[in-house]
Amino acid sequence: MEPQPAVDTDPRVVGDRLRRLRQARGVSLSELAKRAGIGKATLSGVETGTRNPTLETLWAITAQLGVPIGAILDAPPEPQIMRGTAIEAELLEVFEDDRVTYELYRVRVPPGLTQTSPAHHEGVSEHVTVFTGTLSAGPIDEPLTAGPGDHISWRSDVPHGYRAHGPDVVRATLLMRYPTKP
């Protein structure tokens, strides 16, 4: 089975947006790759649109730029689907309030796989409400568990993960809160 791209947005558009954000912050390609924990060739390929990055790679890069992942995607009204190792997230809305950006996702996590995400920038938090299935999510060393109707939240400026338990697919909403970096 052919792997699906991490996002439905044209990779050249994503790459161009990343390059402009990196340059606006005065960060070299080498420095951003080092900070994000990825290879310089990988970052170069993402910026030119010739590489199909994983969701984890995109989150690692945007975290180091201090922006939400929505900054590199096409704005809704057409929902954007993002795929990671064990999560499918549909970006429903991006909104801002004073010095905070919020991204609202509809999430699907199939059983049996684990999604590990890198730390986002300081102060970012994730808020999940589970509708079906049982989900373990949160910091790698202290995951939280939620079933139907439960809500969990954590600061996601540390490595964190998602895992569905049992035979059911987890369906949930995820609200990501990104404070603006000073």
Image: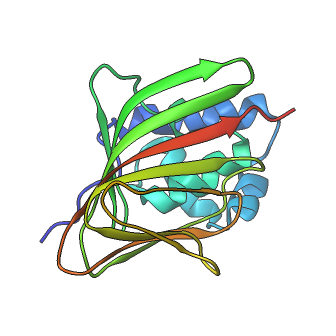
Estimate the x, y position of residue 102 in percent, counting from the top left.
56, 32
Residue 18, position as x, y percentages in the image: 58, 38
Mark yes or no: residue 35 visible: yes
Residue at the (78%, 50%) spot, across then down:
122
Q: Is residue 9 left or right of residue 160?
A: left
User: Quick check: 12 left or right of 63?
Assistant: left
Res 163 → quadrant: bottom left
For the image, the number of numbered tags is 0
Q: In this view of the protein, can residue 67 be seen by the observer? A: no
At which x and y percent is residue 113? 32, 78
Q: Which of 75 and 178 is in front in this view?
A: 178
Is 138 situated left or right of 76 in this image?
right
User: For the point 87% across and 32% down, which residue is it?
Assistant: 182
Outermost residue toward the right in this view: 182
Identify whether 144 is placed above or below 156: below
Position above or below: 161 against 44: below
Place of residue 121 in the rendered image (x, y in percent of width and height, measured from the top left): 73, 50
